[in-house]
Amino acid sequence: MGTLNFMSPESIQYTSQKQGKDYLKIGLKSDVWSLGCILYNLVYGKTPFQHISATHAKLLAIVDNRQAIEFPDVSDPHLLDVLMKCLRRDPQRRPSISELLEHPYLVEEVMPVAVKQCKDPHVQSLISEIENLSPASVKKMKEVRSLTGFT
């Protein structure tokens, strides 16, 4: 069934019976909720309902639209937007995985334009490695910074 702190509202609410046995009838957007809980935990150091210790109260809070989820300010507005969208209680209003992959938080340019426009072959080689996410590229980022004056 899963850990309560990461369970979507629909995984708590939508059970059905098939051949006399209970089973969960949930979609992929339930995983988006869980991803939102994981991201929330990474950002804030706790899950959205971690402060509620009683199991029954926690279950009720997860499914209750009146129980607001707190979203303290973060430095990146795109990150906050992803968190808020992933943790929408209505799965129909939650983004799909493909929509999340197109979100500005995940596709925003991280390489400064001046670095990308640099014609130095060494810098271009480093950029290529970084864009391909090779493990050695992380160490070479310092070289790009020193060559371009970015710190």
Image (cartoon, helix red, strand yellow):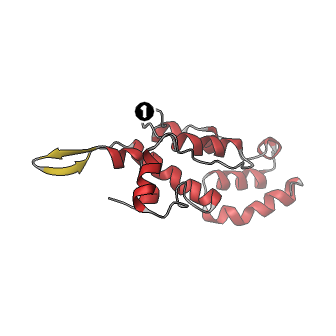
Could you say whether the residue bearing mark 1 is in a helix, strand or loop?
loop
At a point 74% along the width and 47% down the height, the residue shown is 111
Which residue does the numbered mark 1 point to in the structure image? 92
Front residue (pair 50, 7): 50
Amino acid residing under circle 1: Gln
Please tell me which residue is depicted at 33% across the width and 45% down the height of the picture. 13
Return the residue found at the far top.
Answer: 92
* Quadrant (top left, top right, bottom left, bottom right) of the N terminus: bottom left
Residue at image point 64% right, 57% down: 43
Q: Quadrant of the C terminus?
A: bottom right
In the rendered view, does 131 fall on the left or right side of 97? Answer: right
Q: Is residue 127 above or below residue 102?
A: below
Of residues 52 and 81, the one nearer the viewer is 52
Image location (x, y in percent) of residue 81: 63, 40
Please report the residue visible at 58 percent of the width from the left and 54 percent of the height from the top.
Answer: 40
Count of numbered circles in the view: 1
- Residue 59: horizontal and vertical position, in percent? 41, 53
Residue 98, percent from left and from top? 47, 38
Q: Please indicate, yes or no, whether residue 22 appears anywhere in the rendered image.
A: yes
